Amino acid sequence: MSFISLTLFAQIQNPVKWTYSVENNGKEEATLVIKASIDKGWHLYSQFIGEGGPVPTSFRFDKNNNYTLVGKVNEIPKAKPIFDEIFGMQVAWFESSATFKQKIKVSSNKDFKINGALEFMVCDDKQCLPPEEVEFSFDIKGVVMTSDVSATETK
């Protein structure tokens, strides 16, 4: 029985490693940065894939009252357009690495977390792995509230 378990374990592939960080853009803005490091020979699909193709990369940010999303998730660099033989259609994918950025507006003066998940699919020139969902969490610093009232000197 242990031989079968070992064989199945050896066949598990994980060609994408995800890292997460936060860029502080100013007093009330930040950017959530999600980076994919992709193993050689594999490709990760863009968010922008037509019907009938592979599962596009997608993001879900759990809502809470401490922040709001600003715009949509940006892809850096731009995904490489290519005709995918496996799906028989034009797609866009990333090789080696991809960075996804989501701007947010912070509305809390207390530190908080943003939780969510991403879904993605990867393929190489012979196979595609089933779509996978990965949960993430960002630690966000609350906005430092300052007074806009300036003191005036009286004589």
Image (spheres, helix red, strand yellow):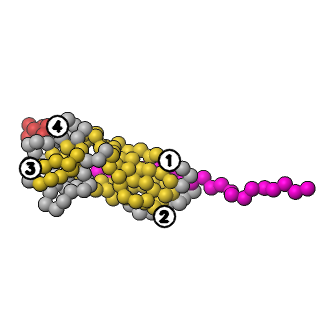
Q: Secondary structure at mark 3?
A: loop
* Residue 7: percent from left, percent from top: 10, 38
Q: Which residue is mark 1?
A: 24
Mark 3 burial class by Cα count in 10 Å: few <14, some 14-19, many 20+: some
Identify which residue, 145 or 70, lies in the foreground: 70
The residue sitting at 20% across, 43% down in the picture is 43
Return the disc, 4 or 2, that comes first in the chain's sequence: 4
Q: Secondary structure at mark 1?
A: strand
**What amino acid type should be assigned to the residue bearing mark 3?**
Ile
The residue sitting at 38% across, 50% down in the picture is 101
Q: Which residue is mark 3?
A: 86
Q: Which residue is mark 4?
A: 41
**What amino acid type should be assigned to the residue bearing mark 2?**
Asn
Disc 3 or disc 2, which is closer to the eye? Answer: 3
Mark 4 touches mark 2? (CB < 8 Å): no
The residue sitting at 33% across, 46% down in the picture is 76
Return the disc, 3 or 2, that comes first in the chain's sequence: 2
Q: Which quadrant of the figure has residue 56?
A: bottom left
Q: Which residues are magenta?
A: 132-155
